[in-house]
Image (spheres, rainbow, N blue to C red):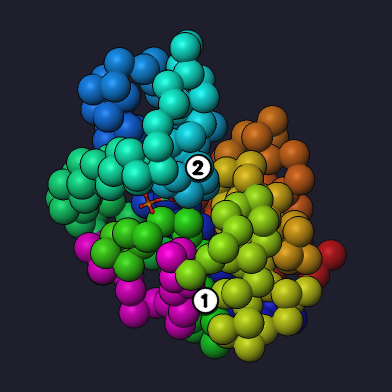
Amino acid sequence: HIQAVLFDLDGVITDTAEYHYLAWKKLADELQVPFDRHFNEALKGLSRMDSLKKILENARPEPSFSKEKLSELADRKNEYYKELIRQISPADLLPGIHNLLEDIKERGIKTALASASKNAMFVIDRLGVASFFDEIVDAARIQHGKPDPEIFLTGARKLDADPAFCIGIEDAEAGIQAIKAAGMFAVGVGTPENMKQADFLVEGTQDLDFEKIESAFLL
Ligand code: B16
Ligand code: MG
């Protein structure tokens, strides 16, 4: 039976992608490098520094910055982002998520948050759902970002759960790869093109029904 469910944050519990987009866009405009909503899709699930590097690699000519400058730029983006997420409220929970968390808790199944975001704790608090999570993996302590399985394996270890009996829920391709590499059952939120490796796929969070996920897991 299912021992634990591990959740991604951005795109599964709430849609912080828009705020990440706006913050990166402001920085990119200041640096006069191209950046748009389409390119933002490729950043989902990636760490702050990996995202910055990807944005800069895409510019022609590619700017070259010192390590210190890169970290100053990443900090600047984070200041813009933190300003935007101050307005998050429980109304920003994605559809179906509150019910899903309740259904999981009622069954005594453990939960962890496996988000690459160092702001995850703040966001979860603003959404009013912090008490639903038994563990929140600290992204600052993770050495290898998604698609590496480290964040999901760390979550399972903290919950004392066997990865083979864990479910991971993700909206990003890098995240699904990380769940599969951890040896877990991957639930994808998105389109079949982006979620090729998912074991169970839904179009939107409103379709995340615990009984359906459990039946698919037991198959
Ligand atoms: P921060 P997730 C990820 O969250 C976002 O999808 C990604 O766009 C962001 O760069 C990353 O968190 C790091 O966030 O700058 O707040 O540390 O999808 O893993 O919940
Ligand atoms: Mg995500």
Please rate how many residues cluster around mark 2, counting C-alpha atoms within 10 Å: few if below 14, some from 14 to 19, many from 20: few
Could you give the CA–CA distance between mark 1 and mark 2, rounded to whole angstroms? Answer: 27 Å
Q: Is residue 164 left or right of residue 168?
A: right
Q: Residue at x 33, y 39 (%)?
A: 69
Give percent across and percent down for residue 151. Answer: 58, 65
Q: Position of residue 55 (x, y in %)?
A: 45, 28
| Residue 80 picture quarter | top left
| Residue 150 left/right relative to 21 | right
Q: Is mark 2 within 8 Å of ligand 1?
A: yes
Q: Is residue 43 above or below residue 47?
A: above
Residue 181 shown left or right of residue 119 in the figure: right
Which span is picked out in magenta?
125-140
- Location of the N terminus by quadrant is bottom right
Q: Magenta includes 127?
A: yes
* Viewer-nearest of discs 1 and 2: 2
| Picture layout, residue 24 above or below residue 116 | above
Residue type at the position of mark 1: Thr
Query: What residue sits right under mark 2 in the picture?
Result: 50
Query: Which residue occupies 53% across, 66% down?
Result: 142
Looking at the image, is 88 positioned above or below residue 193? below
Residue under numbered circle 1: 111
